[in-house]
Image (cartoon, helix red, strand yellow):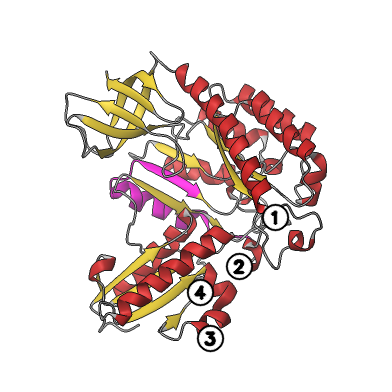
Amino acid sequence: MNAACTQVSIINLGCARNLVDAQIMLGRLRRKGCLLTKPQQARILIVNTCCFIETARQEAIDTILDVLELKKGGHVSKVILAGCLVERYGRELCAELKDVDALVGVPIFIKDRRLDQVPLTPRHYAYLKICEGCYNSCSYCIIPKLKGRLASRTIPSLVEEMRVLDGRGVREVNLIGQDVSAYGIDCDSRLNLVSLLEALTNAAGNISWIRLLYLFPTRITDDLLDTVATQERICKYIDLPLQHINNRILKAMNRPMAADMIKRLIDKIRVKIPGVCLRSSFIVGFPGETDQDFEELVKFIRDVRFDRLGAFMYSREEGTVAYRLEGQIPAEVKQARYDTLMKEQQTISLDLNRRLTGQTLRVLIDEISSEQENLFIGRTQSDAPEVDGQVFVTSRRRLQPGDFVDVRITDTSEYDLNGVME
């Protein structure tokens, strides 16, 4: 794309990793002289796609078709597709969608320097992608085929970006990658997540929260837990996707940690990091999962009482090992199991939240409510942006996004809290 383009915008779909890719694309376009604008005002519109599971693919296709309708109506001159869907199905998209002007796939990952980005997050928080690709070989996952093997960014490039974010007024940085616990294992043996965290906390300046998103259980070391526990800036938040607890299902998923090891790890985390927020995610309806296997999973969740929990219905992805497994589960059974699991977690979450009533918590303000005067919306250290709960804060003082305030919790619901600024 040349510098003659005037109005360009991007519609980003999928996860925070995609969001960083979109920010980098916009940074490159800005350097080329393009005028960046909102999607409804753009003449050139980029759709940055996701295709991790079936629902993501459907969302991408629906969005592309909507954008192509805008082109037919003369509202958009050019439509460009980018991201994982293009990487996986580029040939088919080229054959089926004749009105698409270009397909560009997944951006090349740059390891050794900071790239200019156009922020797509609110001013006070950001995502910092520390690695790309995946070192794991989970049988249900298509990511390694789309993003390749693990590639870690250098510490100097990440420290430079951290300082840029601090200078921009960011107060919370979320470290992301397919598996941030694998950071550095593709490089020098002395390079690991602990050494990166030490460098980033030293460069943080006014950044108060550093959050780790996605830690593979077998790579959670004592050194990492000690670092999280003792470094004031690092959120006491462990994102530990476990996927299941039944040993036979874990083996079929090619997950290397058995049930007894998982339970010991959870106990260790809670001992080493008092008051830790423990988040996990699980897959229901994996091929061969019996009613008994599912009940084992429900009991495990009931016993452990995760602070935060997400669930996904297994998506059969062509090109994965699990695609060929026997015992595929009917859609209605997967839906029923998903509903049961989330209802169980809803009960747990409500009880855990009720125990916070009367406590005073540190809250980062995200936005000003448009529905009620003196009402502001924020998050605690236990809530990652976009995926976890919120705190609805009543304050006589006018607050701004990025403010940290102490809030006394007065009421709770299943996932959110209500409170008054102290």
Q: Is residue 326 above or below residue 87?
A: above
Per the rendering, the mark at residue 105 is 4
* Amino acid type indicated by mark 4: Gly
Residue 290: quadrant of the picture: top right
Answer above or below: position of 12 versus 163.
below
- The alpha-carbon separation of the residues under discs 3 and 2 comes to 20 Å
- Name which of mark 1 and mark 2 comes first in the sequence: 1
According to the picture, the residue beneath numbered tag 2 turns out to be 146
Closer to the eye: label 1 or 2: 2
1 vs 4, front mark: 4
Horizontal side of residue 222 vs 93, given as left or right: right
**For the residues marked 4 and 3, what is the alpha-carbon distance in whole angstroms?**
15 Å
Residue 95: numbered disc:
3
**From what the image shows, is residue 16 above or below residue 341?**
below
Compare residues 122 and 280 and report the one nearer the observer.
280
> Of label 1 and label 4, which has the lower sequence position?
4
The verdict on residue 108 being magenta is no
Provide the residue span drawn in magenta: 149-175
